[in-house]
């Protein structure tokens, strides 16, 4: 007989702000809600406006999928509760939502028969990333099926990443967001130095970076301005100097980094003072 509810929750912290709280059909899909205490479980259920609080995590055995969310300082205690619970994990999904869980923890539940996945929101709207068990296939892995169902309910796209690659993914997110913002700011400052008024300088700098990103999405590394043609060396030297003492080493490194990364125009990199490693 098909279970009455699709999901149970074991949570701590801001569960309502996680993917669990965003489920549009959670009212009919969410069943038992467990936490470190019945009082906390009641508060979470009230926040979600769905599910019902339970006194022990044992009652999560009644659902095919358990959604877990906890901040780092509460995760270990909650995982201890989950490990001690009388749950038959065979054929069940354990999905860690918007929290950091290492491979060793997931392996402990996998040994017990659980199918696990880590899913979280990231900077790009309309997408969630999912790290499923190694070797998982969408048609056979219960946790992955659960994540794809959640994505459909949220009208989002699940983007799979390789197991253990979360730090590489996060590095890409940082490189494409926080790390690049100061460069946009410096480009806007140079445009202001060139006589363009403040607001327009910021808009023009933003548009420039957006266009570069669009070109890359269309043509990849071949969209790089110097992929084929040789960079104007003397002009580049003048541009690097115009950046001022703080920007000059950064701009020089970025230009030569591109030349080295794409393995193009080594002589230009040498002229700009780059020493190959």
Image: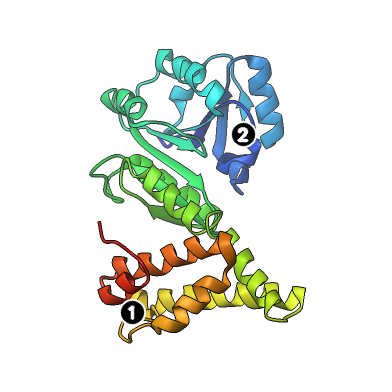
Can residue 171 be seen here? yes
Q: Position of residue 120 (x, y in %)?
A: 49, 45
Residue labelled with disc 2: 15
| 239 vs 208, nearest the viewer | 239
Which of marks 1 and 2 precedes in the sequence?
Answer: 2
User: What residue sits 37% from the left and 71% below the top?
Assistant: 272
Q: Position of residue 255 (x, y in %)?
A: 41, 69
User: What residue sits 37% from the left and 82% below the top?
Assistant: 231
Query: Is the residue 249 above or below the residue 24 in the image?
Result: below
Q: Position of residue 239 (x, y in %)?
A: 52, 76
Q: Secondary structure beneath disc 1?
A: helix
**Left or right: where 98 falls relative to 47:** left
Query: Is the residue 77 above or below the residue 178 in the image?
Result: above
Q: Residues within 10 Å of mark 2 (few under 14, many from 20)?
A: many
Q: Position of residue 266 (x, y in %)?
A: 26, 73
Residue labelled with disc 1: 222
């Amino acid at each position: 007989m098909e279970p009455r509810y699709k999901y149970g929750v074991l949570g701590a912290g801001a569960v309502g702000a996680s993917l669990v709280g965003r489920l549009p059909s959670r009212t009919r899909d969410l069943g038992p809600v467990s936490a470190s205490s019945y009082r906390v479980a009641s508060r979470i259920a009230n926040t979600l406006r769905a599910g019902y609080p339970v006194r022990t995590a044992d009652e999560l055995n009644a659902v095919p999928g358990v959604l877990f969310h906890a901040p780092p300082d509460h995760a270990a205690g909650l995982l201890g509760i989950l490990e001690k619970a009388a749950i038959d994990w065979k054929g069940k999904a354990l999905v860690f939502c918007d929290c950091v869980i290492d491979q060793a923890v997931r392996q402990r539940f996998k040994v017990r028969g659980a199918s696990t996945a880590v899913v979280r929101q990231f900077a790009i709207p309309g997408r969630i990333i999912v790290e499923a068990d190694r070797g998982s296939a969408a048609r056979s892995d219960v946790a992955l099926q659960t994540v794809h169902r959640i994505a459909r309910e949220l009208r989002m796209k699940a983007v799979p990443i390789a197991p253990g690659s979360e730090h590489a993914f996060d590095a890409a997110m940082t490189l494409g967001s926080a790390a690049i913002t100061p460069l946009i700011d410096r480009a806007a400052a140079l445009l202001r130095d060139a006589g363009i008024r403040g607001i327009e300088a910021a808009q023009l700098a933003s548009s420039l970076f957006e266009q570069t990103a669009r070109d890359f999405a269309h043509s990849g590394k071949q969209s790089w301005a110097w992929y084929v043609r040789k960079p104007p060396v003397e002009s580049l030297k003048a541009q690097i100097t115009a950046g001022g003492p703080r920007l000059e080493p950064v701009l020089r490194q970025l230009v030569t980094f591109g030349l080295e990364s794409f393995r193009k125009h080594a002589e230009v990199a040498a002229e700009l003072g780059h020493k190959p490693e």
